[in-house]
Amino acid sequence: MTRREDDRPPRSAVPRHTEPVTAQPLAPAQTVGGLPWLTDEEFLLLTPDEQDLYLRILQADLEQEDARPPVPDSPGAIAELVTGGIELHPRHLQLVDEAYVALDRHEIDRLLITMPPQHGKSSRARWGSLHRLTRRPEDRIVVASAELDLAREHTRWVRNTIETHPELNLATARDRRSARAWDLDGQPVPRRSYRPARARELDRRP
């Protein structure tokens, strides 16, 4: 059935939203060394001396952030030991370390970490694997990734770090140390492979 033009209700009969709109309060601005975080436009309004002072305060604030100590007995503590203090421990990675520690203590039984790209997820997962092996060398760790080569790169990095840092008190088995699957010295060889058939098929490719 086709609606005729004269069947439409008059404009005054069309219901409209008439409730007043309440302005939401703005979120508090970020601060740098106690000063408000400036936009590019606001920064350009400062005098050269004020800009220099602001940048020096910003640099000092960033250095204080980078100087955070690692969480004790955590992946960050292992990174501190291996790198000689070069590895940084910003707050978001400290939260990741605290989650790893809770997992190791059985305070939680599973852990999913989500962060934007280039924020240290993969790097902390590597240190997390090392931390787990120093605590429980009998455990088996499976590294998965969207790319097979990337997964092997991670496992190779963990293996090489163990072999080049005796202070970790770990050693890889001489006869089982391929990047695909390696074991720790003194630990029993697993009786079966948990690798899916598709992964084994890719291994046989030249």
Image (cartoon, rainbow, N blue to C red):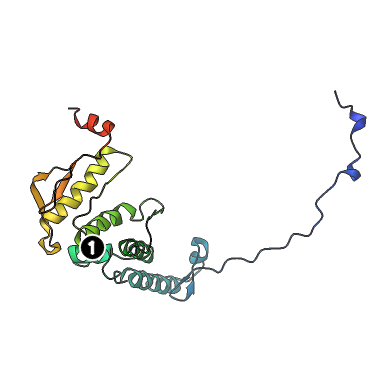
The image quarter containing residue 191 is: top left
Between 73 and 67, the residue placed more toward the observer is: 73
Residue 73 position (above or below residue 201) = below
Q: Residue at x 19, y 61 (%)?
A: 134
The image quarter containing residue 20 is: bottom right
Provide the residue designation for mark 1: 79
Between 25 and 155, the residue placed more toward the observer is: 155
Residue 167 position (above or below residue 111) = below
Q: Residue at x 21, y 47 (%)?
A: 155
Picture coordinates of residue 35, whole percent (x, y): 48, 74
Q: Residue furthest left?
A: 174
Local secondary structure at mark 1 = helix
The image quarter containing residue 58 is: bottom left
Between 107 and 22, the residue placed more toward the observer is: 107
Q: Amino acid at mark 1?
A: Ala
Between 97 and 182, the residue placed more toward the observer is: 182
Q: Residues within 10 Å of mark 1 (few under 14, many from 20)?
A: many
Res 203 visible: yes
Quadrant containing the C terminus in the rendered view: top left
